[in-house]
């Protein structure tokens, strides 16, 4: 039986009770008319007992009684039912007593017939109402118990949710602390690693730059010395040597022209001298043992041969010295003196032509060496300038690569910081949502508890 059925049954019971009271009042009036003044004594059953006894429970029933646990309703319906039962028993006893006194049963039956009909209808109604209200107090008790159990379960679930939320909050706080420590450690490690890499690269670049600067300084010093030598001493020496050599070649050419014109006269003079020497040898063959020295003319010829050999040796030495004429001015003077002596001596024999050709070839070699030295100097200067340009370009390239590396590392760090900030913001939002849910559930539980206490 639900609560609505019980309310409807209570209303029906009140209406039936009111109608029964009207019927009982009308019945008591009619019974008074029939029985006269002794109606109260003849029908004592109409007066309800002040304290009716519940035969089923064996105790007196009061209108304000409730169930043992205090959760049931008043037993007013059971009390009235017991009262009607008592009235029925009184009626039966009165009928039995009237029959025993000798009254006519037919007259008693005729008098009690209207009352019995009304009583039967009333009894049926009361039985019907009693059947509908059987177990109403137990239903209300069970309903209150169920409501109480539901409230207790709800409070238990709220407490469980609250404990779970607190544990989650504690775990989240712990996780955030560990995450912050891990992030700090990882950030420090990344920063230290990046700093180490940057320092190593800077050190390598500095070593390369220092080595390049040292080599560049050495090359610049060499170039400076070469340029100073080329601008100062060497050009003056080369100019003097070239001028002296050109003068020697010109004088040699003039002497060779004279030698060619006087060649035949010299040959005839030599033949005459040989003839005279042959005659002298024949005449002095007998006195050769006494005088071991050769004749005068033979000595002259021997001296000429010695002079030729000395001239050839000096010529070879002069050729060797010609390759190093750019190094010292004294060697060029000696060479010019040797050329003059060679020319003076070469006019007396046929080797003057060879000496002239050698002098011309020596001048050509000197000019070639001077040109080659100038070309080498220009080439060295061009190489040094190109090396300087390459070093500058290399330094610019390395600096640009280093800047790109630093910018890329900074971008990586910035990206990691941004991601970590977003993650921490998301975690903060989750914590705030959990706190809001927790506070909402707590407020709802408090409102429910307050409403239950008021009800």
Image (cartoon, rainbow, N blue to C red):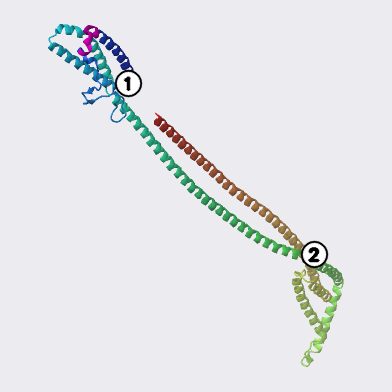
User: Label 2: few (<14), some or many (≥20) within 10 Å?
Assistant: few
Tell me where residue 100 sits by quadrant.
Answer: top left
Q: Which element is circle 2 on?
A: helix
Left or right: where 357 falls relative to 446? right
Q: Which residues are magenta?
A: 31-41
Left or right: where 148 falls relative to 305? left
Rendered location of residue 165, percent (x, y):
43, 40
User: Label 1: few (<14), some or many (≥20) within 10 Å?
Assistant: some
Residue 173 included in the magenta stretch of the image: no
Q: Is residue 138 above or below residue 334?
A: above
Q: Is residue 205 above or below residue 431?
A: below
Between 174 and 349, the one nearer to me in the picture: 174
Pointer 2 residue: 231
Quadrant containing the N terminus is top left
Q: Which element is circle 1 on?
A: helix
Between 249 and 10, the one nearer to me in the picture: 10
Q: Work out how far the residue at label 2 is from the one at label 1, CA to CA, in angstroms.
A: 134 Å
Q: Residue at x 70, y 55 (%)?
A: 389
Can residue 219 be seen in the rendering of this structure? yes
Between 452 and 78, the one nearer to me in the picture: 78
Rendered location of residue 336, percent (x, y):
82, 73
**Dot label at residue 254:** none
Between 50 and 398, the one nearer to me in the picture: 50
Mark 2 or mark 1, earlier in chain: 1
Rendered location of residue 257, percent (x, y):
86, 69
Give the label, 2 or 1, closer to the camera: 1
**Dot label at residue 6:** 1
Q: Is residue 198 above or below residue 30?
A: below
Tell me where residue 339 sits by quadrant.
Answer: bottom right
């Amino acid at each position: 039986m639900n609560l609505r059925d019980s309310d409807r049954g209570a209303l029906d019971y009140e209406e039936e009770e009111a109608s029964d009271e009207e019927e009982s009042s009308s019945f008591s009036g009619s019974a008074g008319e029939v029985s006269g003044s002794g109606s109260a004594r003849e029908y004592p059953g109409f007066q309800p007992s002040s304290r009716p006894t519940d035969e089923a429970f064996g105790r007196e029933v009061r209108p304000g009684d409730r169930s043992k646990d205090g959760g049931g309703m008043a037993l007013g319906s059971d009390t009235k039912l017991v009262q009607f039962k008592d009235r029925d028993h009184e009626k039966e006893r009165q009928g039995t007593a009237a029959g025993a006194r000798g009254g006519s049963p037919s007259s008693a039956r005729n008098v009690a017939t209207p009352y019995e009909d009304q009583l039967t209808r009333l009894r049926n109604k009361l039985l019907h109402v009693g059947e509908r209200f059987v177990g109403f107090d137990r239903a209300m008790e069970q309903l209150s118990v169920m409501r109480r159990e539901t409230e207790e379960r709800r409070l238990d679930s709220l407490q469980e949710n609250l404990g779970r939320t607190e544990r989650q909050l504690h775990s989240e706080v712990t996780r955030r602390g560990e995450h912050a420590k891990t992030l700090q450690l990882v950030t420090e490690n990344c920063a230290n690693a990046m700093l180490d890499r940057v320092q190593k690269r800077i050190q390598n670049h500095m070593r390369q730059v220092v080595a390049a600067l040292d080599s560049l300084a050495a090359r610049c010093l060499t170039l400076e010395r070469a340029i100073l030598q080329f601008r100062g001493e060497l050009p003056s020496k080369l100019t003097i040597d070239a001028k002296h050599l050109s003068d020697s070649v010109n004088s040699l050419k003039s002497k060779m022209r004279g030698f060619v014109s006087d060649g035949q006269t010299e040959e005839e003079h030599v033949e005459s001298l040989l003839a005279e020497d042959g005659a002298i040898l024949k005449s002095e063959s007998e006195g050769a043992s006494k005088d071991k020295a050769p004749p005068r003319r033979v000595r002259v010829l021997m001296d000429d041969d010695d002079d030729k050999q000395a001239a050839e040796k000096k010529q070879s030495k002069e050729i060797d010295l010609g390759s190093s004429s750019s190094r010292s001015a004294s060697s060029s003077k000696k060479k010019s003196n040797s050329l003059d002596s060679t020319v003076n001596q070469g006019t007396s024999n046929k080797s003057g032509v060879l000496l002239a050709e050698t002098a011309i070839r020596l001048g050509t070699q000197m000019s070639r060496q001077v040109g080659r030295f100038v070309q080498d100097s220009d080439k060295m200067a061009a190489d040094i300038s190109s090396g300087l340009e390459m070093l500058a370009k290399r330094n610019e390239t390395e600096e640009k690569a280093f800047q790109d590396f630093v910018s890329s590392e900074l971008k990586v760090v910035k990206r990691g910081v941004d991601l970590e900030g977003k993650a921490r913001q998301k975690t903060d939002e989750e914590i705030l949502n959990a706190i809001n849910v927790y506070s909402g559930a707590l407020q709802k539980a408090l409102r429910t508890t307050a409403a239950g206490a008021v009800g």
